[in-house]
């Protein structure tokens, strides 16, 4: 296992411990879930939840919108770091045996999923993704134990074993779409040095999201989670994290 992947798994484990710590200890700095929580008195809400609740209630609640600012800024600067370093569902999918990866001609499918989620929130008046999301379902399982929401997680796991372990992330997840949009112009990104690159294609094979650090189009920037797997796969050390500019 590469050094970057070990570090990523350790960060995932750290956030997992932070998530479940209040279940056992009342006096902690963190309360809540990755959807919405309180970190040492600072309210945090993920951007999709804030937008969904705004659409569902058909009103603007300033404290809610302000609580989404910190995670929004992080996404603008670092892209889909939540997906690769925090998301518990991603951590689960990464340990699964990877089925034959379904190659996609259109990587913008999560954008359509996001549009459907927002329209549904507007029509029915509830944050539908919070109710039906396997990402949040897994969080509820970790905190409260198994319930009917386990069906959602199981469905994603089975789909991943058939079509590639990140099929949910690549084709459906509207939360990933939000972070992808926010991070399309991010400062921190994975970059390939064309002078060192030998076009071996190992980075393409290593990427579970089906993108490539050699591409600079919107689809690649939107899809990339900055996980760093491609960095470890390069035999020439041509790929690295860079700060834009």
Image (cartoon, helix red, strand yellow):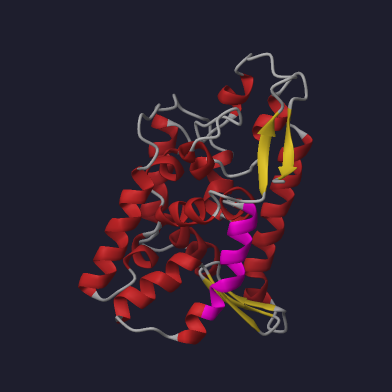
Q: Is residue 229 above or below residue 89?
A: above
74 inside magenta stretch: yes
Rendered location of residue 224, percent (x, y): 55, 41
71 inside magenta stretch: yes
Front position in the image: 70 or 29: 70
In-image side of 62 versus 6 (left or right): left
For image coordinates 71% across by 39% down, the residue present is 5
Q: Which residues are magenta?
A: 66-78
The answer to whether residue 228 is visible is: no
Q: Quadrant of residue 23?
A: bottom right
Rendered location of residue 170, percent (x, y): 43, 40
For image coordinates 69% across by 25% down, the residue present is 233
Rendered location of residue 41, percent (x, y): 67, 85
Front position in the image: 27 or 115: 115
For image coordinates 76% across by 45% down, the residue present is 7
In-image side of 179 versus 132 (left or right): right
Outermost residue, left side: 123
Count of marks placed on residues = 0
In-image side of 225 versus 18 (left or right): left
Q: Quadrant of residue 202?
A: top right
Front position in the image: 51 or 86: 51
Instruction: Give the main secondary structure, helix, strand or loop, of the magenta stretch.
Output: helix
Q: Which quadrant: the N terminus?
A: top right
Front position in the image: 88 or 47: 47
Outermost residue, front side: 245
Rendered location of residue 240, percent (x, y): 74, 35
The answer to whether residue 6 is visible is: yes
For image coordinates 33% across by 84% down, the residue present is 59
């Amino acid at each position: 296992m590469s050094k970057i992947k070990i570090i990523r798994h350790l960060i995932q484990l750290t956030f997992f411990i932070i998530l479940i710590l209040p279940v056992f200890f009342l006096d902690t700095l963190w309360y809540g879930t990755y959807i919405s929580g309180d970190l040492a008195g600072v309210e945090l809400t993920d951007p999709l939840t804030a937008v969904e609740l705004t659409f569902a209630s058909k009103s603007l609640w300033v404290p809610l919108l302000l609580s989404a600012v910190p995670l929004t800024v992080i996404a603008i600067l670092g892209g889909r770091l939540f997906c690769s370093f925090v998301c518990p569902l991603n951590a689960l999918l990464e340990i699964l045996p990877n089925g034959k990866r379904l190659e996609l001609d259109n990587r913008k499918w999560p954008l359509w999923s996001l549009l459907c989620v927002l329209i549904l929130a507007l029509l029915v008046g509830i944050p539908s993704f919070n109710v039906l999301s396997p990402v949040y379902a897994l969080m509820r399982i970790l905190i409260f134990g198994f319930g009917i929401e386990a069906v959602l997680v199981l469905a994603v796991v089975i789909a991943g074993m058939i079509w590639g372990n990140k099929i949910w992330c690549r084709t459906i997840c509207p939360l990933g779409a939000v972070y992808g949009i926010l991070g399309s112009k991010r400062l921190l990104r994975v970059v390939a040095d064309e002078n060192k690159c030998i076009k071996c294609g190992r980075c393409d094979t290593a990427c579970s999201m089906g993108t490539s650090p050699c591409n600079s189009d919107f689809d690649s920037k939107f899809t990339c989670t900055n996980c760093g797997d491609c960095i470890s796969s390069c035999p020439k050390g041509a790929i690295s994290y860079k700060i834009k500019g």
